[in-house]
Amino acid sequence: MGMALVVEDDPELRMLVSMVLEQALDERVVGCESAEAAVAVLDECGRDIDVMVTDIELAGVMTGLELAAMARRRFPELNVIVTSGGDTPDALPDNTIFLPKPWRALDLIQRAQR
């Protein structure tokens, strides 16, 4: 059984994304409110994680874009989805999917299953 990593500072949205992915992908989901916490999860379980969904604005110092870039460098096969309620970021890391908020659950699932 694989894992999904959800990095979102809004607890309700983090729970929603986690439930959607858990049910659709039948994977264990780990949720974090900061990129720093997500890095600790990647350090410990990175090879087991299939998909990471991160908001751009997070608790802590590091942004979701910085986290996405670091995760892509360390785990090239990782499916990384970046979300934001703001404008589309100027520079996304290579092979990273941008999903603007508000997204539909089906759109998230389709991108997570690639």
Image (cartoon, helix red, strand yellow):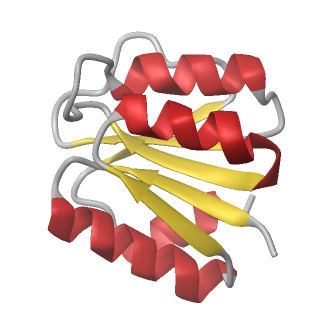
Q: Is residue 93 above or below residue 84?
A: above
Residue at left 17%, top 70%?
Answer: 12
Report the side of 7 relative to 80 (left or right): left
1 in relation to 93, above or below = below
State which quarter of the image contains the N terminus.
Answer: bottom right
Relative to 40, 59 lies left or right:
left
Q: Count the marks.
A: 0
Which quadrant of the figure has residue 87?
Answer: top left
Which residue corresponds to the image point at 16% horizontal and 33% vertical from the top-left? 86
> Where does the image place residue 89, in percent across and percent down from the top left?
33, 20
Using the image as rendered, state which of residue 61 and residue 18 is in the foreground: 61
Question: Dividing the picture into quarters, in which one does residue 75 lie?
Answer: top right
Tell me what residue is drawn at x 41 percent, y 59 percent: 31
Compared with 87, 106 (above or below) is below
Left or right side of 54 for 111: right
In the rendering, at what x and y percent does residue 45 appear? 72, 48
Question: Is residue 93 at least partly visible in the picture?
Answer: no
Report x, y in % for residue 49: 72, 53
Instruction: Check the picture and name the quadrant holding the C terminus.
Output: bottom right
The single residue placed furthest to the top in the displayed view is 91
The x, y position of residue 2, in whole percent, is 77, 67
Q: Which residue lies at the image location 48% right of the left edge and 66% below the top edge?
A: 107
Residue 99, visible in the rendered structure: yes
